[in-house]
Amino acid sequence: MSTLRPTATRRRLPSLEDALRGAAIVVISAIIFFPVYWMIVSSIRPSAESLSFPPPLLPGSIDLQSYVQLFVEKPIARWLLLSTLVASLTVIGTLILVIPAAYALSRLYWPGRSAFGLLLLFTQMMPAAVVVAPVLALYRGLGWTDNLWALALLHTAFVVPLCAWVLKASFDAVPKEIVEAALIDGCDRWKVLWLVVLPLTKPGLVAVSVIAFFASWNEYLFASTLITRNDLYTASLGLATLMTQLDTPLFVLMAAGVTFSVLPVLFYMAIQRHLLRGLTAGAVKG
């Protein structure tokens, strides 16, 4: 008697739809990544290759003269350091202000809560160019121009409304039963926030940090208005000084663009681990 064996599961062959979907993903990814690739390649190959027509897609040789010129002749290290300082202060200030604001919008019930939340959202609809003149007048009156701490405070003020709504959504996702159990066990509202809600909303905190960091890192309008001293230039201001009326060093700009993009990418890669860890962490085990 022959022994019956389970039939091996056959692998499903990719259908035409799967093939088209994969091809579309490849094409879209190539279109999105190509400007970044071209910026990197243009910054490391000889200028003669870039000026040839048509320019080759792959560099024939490596020439780091653009980076040497950038780091030797320009104080880009100081620009990046000051940008990191301002962005870090913005993240810290945003977290300090947005955590109680989002908790009040999510878990506390008080008259005018919905109207206040909508007003926060409406502040994001006003272009920054409309308020730059009043902000400049206010900062001049307070003596806060040419002050990186004051610039970080301004960045924080503009990013808090959006971050409050982002974090509110994370607080809303925490089950009410967990909060009520903590209150029954004797925790007050602050202990519930710090010991129960925040550990369960790490992805929201990470998202808020990323939004605040990138908003401050890329901001140019207010920085160019409030900062006039060369020794206080952030990276966005410093890179703008590379372009003059008489000369636009294209390949140095490419190298500067690559350098300016490295730190935010490293920041996101470092914080992404915590984001994934927070997404997989559960409130209840078993």
Image (cartoon, rainbow, N blue to C red):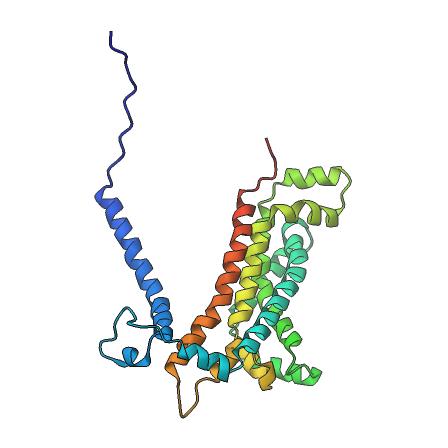
Q: Position of residue 271 (x, y in %)?
A: 54, 56
Q: Quadrant of the N terminus?
A: top left
Q: Residue at x 52, y 80 (%)?
A: 237
Can residue 215 be seen in this snapshot?
yes
Above or below residue 203? Residue 30 is: below
* Residue 100, percent from left and from top: 68, 56
- Which residue reaches farthest top? 1
Q: Residue furthest bottom?
A: 246
**226 and 110: which one is in front?**
226
Q: Quadrant of residue 184?
A: top right
Would you say 275 lies left or right of 192 here? Answer: left
The location of residue 87, given as percent across then percent down, is 59, 68
Q: Residue at x 61, y 39 (%)?
A: 283
Say above or below: 43 vs 27: below
Viewport quadrant of the C terminus: top right
Q: Is residue 133 visible?
A: no
In terms of image quadrants, where is residue 137? Answer: bottom right
Q: Position of residue 180 (x, y in %)?
A: 69, 39
Q: Residue at x 34, y 75 (%)?
A: 45
Foreground residue among 39 and 286: 39
Task: Tell me what residue is drawn at x 57 percent, y 77 percent.
Answer: 78
